[in-house]
Amino acid sequence: MRSLALGFFCLLYCNTAQPERRRPKHITVKGRNDTTIQNITVENPCKAMPLDFVFVIDSSRSIRPNDYEKAKTFIIHLLQFLDIGHNATRVGLLQYGSVVQPEFSLNTYTTKAEVEEAVRNMQHLATGTMTGLAIQYTMEVALTEEQGARQMSLQIPRIAMIVTDGRPQDTVEEIAAQARQAGIQIFAIGVGRVEMNTLKAIGSEPHSEHVHLVANFSQIETLISVFKSKLCGGEESLILSLVSLFVYHV
Ligand SMILES: *[C@@H]1O[C@H](CO)[C@@H](O)[C@H](O)[C@H]1NC(C)=O
Ligand SMILES: *[C@@H]1O[C@H](CO)[C@@H](O)[C@H](O)[C@H]1NC(C)=O
Ligand SMILES: *[C@@H]1O[C@H](CO)[C@@H](O)[C@H](O)[C@H]1NC(C)=O
Ligand SMILES: *[C@@H]1O[C@H](CO)[C@@H](O)[C@H](O)[C@H]1NC(C)=O
């Protein structure tokens, strides 16, 4: 019952967190085992919580070369808010066109500098848009223990951030639902003429937190401030939605 109460608290609270509200120093995360209560001490809010975080980047033909560079810049800016390390946040990245191309896994790099360099070095595929296939790969390969995701019992949030500029050539609804049910928190970011319904079929609830649509790749930078507040704790919402993620898996 306590978990239900906390989940309900989150439903009410996560969407209404006031920007000016200060984050408490200690956040108690209720785990799937009732006797397990873990304290997370927030020294630097940006480094509040380890994550297993996989970027899933649309590398289709319709993305122009300078837009592809902007997508890379967006990723590099987001990395600034993550505390990357073997025992902190692990980052993986795959891009997809007609096929899925893994760039690096959660267990490939242990420093931010290495991750940044790998992002800078990735090459535009310029093929199709097999978004469903990419989500399937994320669930079945990229966010598994074999590839460096930590055991489910450690309750490290598994996050996939999908950036796409177009209409998928395959179906996404069912596979995205499966991935969410498997405990993956999915952020869906659409750039340009992406249908909102497609993004909503991909992203986790609440959609106000997880689903974002911007007009073009220049506008994608406007999302940095949104994610900065989520990842750095300007608001409590991400932390609390992660808490709710745990709670729903009790
Ligand atoms: C919960 O965790 C405690 C401490 O780790 C353990 O002793 C207990 O057996 C666990 N209970 C269940 C139901 O898994
Ligand atoms: C969690 O932190 C609070 C506040 O510092 C403390 O009173 C409490 O004992 C801690 N609980 C555990 C299980 O460590
Ligand atoms: C990670 O944590 C484990 C267990 O606490 C420790 O043995 C190991 O040295 C740590 N690794 C790094 C790179 O900090
Ligand atoms: C991107 O979209 C914004 C908002 O619609 C618009 O003002 C801007 O001119 C666009 N930039 C480019 C390069 O198309």
Image (spheres, helix red, strand yellow):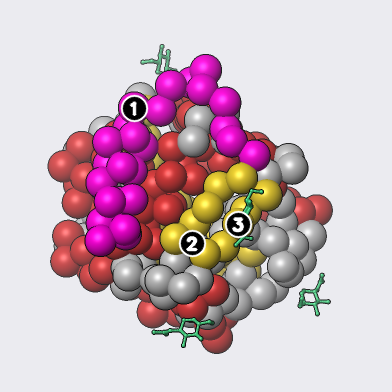
Pointer 3 or 1: first along the chain: 1
Q: Residues within 10 Å of mark 1 (few under 14, many from 20)?
A: few
**C-alpha distance separating marks 2 and 3:** 15 Å
Q: Nearer the viewer, residue 26 or 73?
A: 26
**C-alpha distance separating marks 2 and 1:** 22 Å
Compared across the picture, whether 83 is left or right of 174 comes to right
The kind of residue on which mark 1 rests is Thr
Q: Is residue 42 visible?
A: yes
Compared across the picture, whether 244 is left or right of 170 comes to right
Q: Nearer the viewer, residue 65 or 208?
A: 208
Residue that numbered label 3 is attached to: 39
Name the image quarter holding the C terminus. Answer: bottom left
Queried on whether the Cβ of the residue with tag 3 lies below 8 angstroms from ligand 2, the answer reads yes
Instruction: Please name the residue shown 39% across and 47% down the image.
Output: 241
Label count reads: 3
The kind of residue on which mark 2 rests is Pro
* Residue 146 x, y percent position in the rendering: 55, 86
* Residue 110 x, y percent position in the rendering: 76, 66
Compared across the picture, whether 23 is left or right of 249 comes to right
Label 1 element class: loop
Q: Is residue 104 above or below residue 127?
A: below
* Residue 120 x, y percent position in the rendering: 69, 50
* Discs 2/3, front: 3
Please tell me the numbered disc located at residue 157.
2
Q: Is residue 117 above or below residue 139?
A: above
Q: Which residues are magenta?
A: 1-25
Pointer 2 or 3: first along the chain: 3
Instruction: Please name the residue shown 43% across and 45% down the image.
Output: 240
Residue that numbered label 1 is attached to: 16
Label 3 element class: strand
Q: Residues within 10 Å of mark 3 (few under 14, many from 20)?
A: few
Label 2 element class: loop
